[in-house]
Structure formats: structure tokens, C-alpha cells
Amino acid sequence: MDVTALLMRKLNMRRELSSAACEALAATASTQSEVAAGSILVRDGNDPTPVCSLLIEGLAIRYKITSGGNRQIVAVETPGDFLDLQHLFLKVADHSVEALTPLRVVKIDRAHLRTLALEYPEIGEALWTEALIEASIMREWLANVGRREGRMRIAHLLCELARREEAIGMARRDTLILPLTQEQIGDITGLTAIHVNRMLKALVADGLIEQSGRQILIRDREGLAAAGDFNPRYLHLDQVSAIA
């Protein structure tokens, strides 16, 4: 698929674009590229890269590292997400973004996209809506780590990732592909890998999920949602559809 068409489709999910805005986007310098797993796309403390990346295939993580070397993963990015929209107007990156799996991304000239956001209100509104949804998800993650106990945190995370993967066509209903290690799940939920392992086994023992390698089958969707205090309202899925 043409990379400009992908960008226009993404923004049209957030706000219907005028013909003038679409013509302006068609002139945007953009390319499609592959990114190896483990690659750092944004590095905390560095200047933002000259391009802004839209994720088309694969998963990425957004994280902070403390002075003591402890990592907190603050977001998991799925296809259709911008990997560095936060730095469209900021001069210094305040967190890092890493490819969790091999990625396919659309790279868009940052300066041109910034100009379009200012010159075309509907493009600016689409990007603003995207940023607001990212902030909504981050608020929920903050509540999850700060106010839910361990089993609930894991159940909530599984519910969210399953709903997001289902929404973009990555997985069948009630099936979750989870390319996260238990240590990485711990970095998301503020738990040790041992605690994560115990909580996953508890959810299996309760008949809520089955786990086979990196695939999780949700056996009791309502039960898992109740266990995780999960309400998908914060995902704003009425404004999300498949990008590929």
C-alpha cells in the first residue's frame, strides 16, 4: 500500500480530512522501512529524529529508565500507532522507544508534518485526537500500577492488549499474541518476573485464561475483565480501525 495513502487513512480515522488537506499530505516526504527487533527508534535525552514513524506491522515499547537502572514500560505500541508523535513539537526526547519485534514503519518528514498540523486545522485536530487517546491510555496505566493489586494489574493488561489486537485485526476474538517476556510484563506492571509468573498461573488456575508459549486464550472474557477491573472506554475504540 502507498505510504501516503496509509498516512491519510490513519488521520481520517481521527478526523475527516478535506480534499485540500489530502493534497497537502500527498506532498509529504514519506518512506516505508523495516526495523529490526531491539532497535532504539527514540532515545531519552536525544534530539528527536528528522522523521516521525507510523507503525504498520509489529509491536514497540515506550519506556523510562531511572538513575538506578530500573525500567518502567509506559506504553505498548501496536499497528496504527505513531511511535514518536509526542516529539512533534518538543525539542528533546523525554523517553525511549524500542522495537519489541521486527517492525514495518512509515517514516514521515517531521518538519513537514508539523507545518501541516498548523496550516490545516483538520490535520492538527486528527493529530491532537491521537495524542489525547495516548494520554487516556497512559492515565489508565498509571491507575493500574498505582492502585490495583498484582493479579488485577496482569488481568487488566491482558484485557487491554487483547482488545487492541482484536480492534486492528492482529488476533481473533479472545486470543492474544503476547511477545512480552515475564520480565517485560513486570516492567509494565511494576512487579517482579516471579510475581508475574505466579499471577499468570493463578489466572490459568481460575479458568480465566490458557497459555501456550506466547499465545493466550481468554476462556472467560467477562471473568477476566472483572478480575482486572477492566472497562475499555479509555481506549476510545470507536475511533480506531485497522491500518493494514
Image (cartoon, helix red, strand yellow):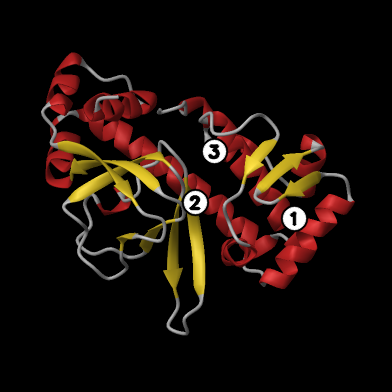
Please report contact status of discs 1 and 3: CB closer than 8 Å, yes or no: no
Please report contact status of discs 2 and 3: CB closer than 8 Å, yes or no: no
> Is 229 on the left-hand or right-hand side of 81?
right
Kind of residue indicated by mark 2 = Val
Estimate the x, y position of residue 186 in percent, counting from the top left.
62, 66
Q: Distance between the residues labelled 1 and 2?
A: 18 Å
Tell me the quarter of the picture where residue 26 sits.
Answer: top left
Q: Disc 3 marks which residue?
A: 235
The numbered mark, 2 or 3, whose residue comes first in the sequence reads 2
Q: Distance between the residues labelled 1 and 3?
A: 18 Å
Find residue 82 and name its label: none
Q: Distance between the residues labelled 2 and 3?
A: 13 Å
Please report contact status of discs 1 and 2: CB closer than 8 Å, yes or no: no
Q: For the residue carrying disc 1, how many other residues have a C-alpha within 10 Å: few (<14), some (14-19), or many (20+)?
A: many
Q: From the viewer's side, name the closer residue of 166 and 86.
A: 166
Q: Disc 1 marks which residue?
A: 152
The numbered mark, 1 or 3, whose residue comes first in the sequence reads 1
Say which residue appears at 74% left-offset and 55% top-offset: 152
- Considering only vertical position in the picture, is 232 above or below 120? below
Kind of residue indicated by mark 3 = Leu
- Considering only vertical position in the picture, is 44 above or below 203? below
Q: From the viewer's side, name the closer residue of 89 and 63.
A: 63
Say which residue appears at 78% left-offset and 61% top-offset: 199
> Is 134 on the left-hand or right-hand side of 119?
right
Q: Disc 2 marks which residue?
A: 76
> Is 1 on the left-hand or right-hand side of 157?
left
Q: From the viewer's side, name the closer residue of 102 and 205.
A: 102
Q: What element carries label 2?
A: strand
Q: For the residue carrying disc 3, how many other residues have a C-alpha within 10 Å: few (<14), some (14-19), or many (20+)?
A: some
Tell me the quarter of the picture where residue 40 sits.
Answer: bottom left
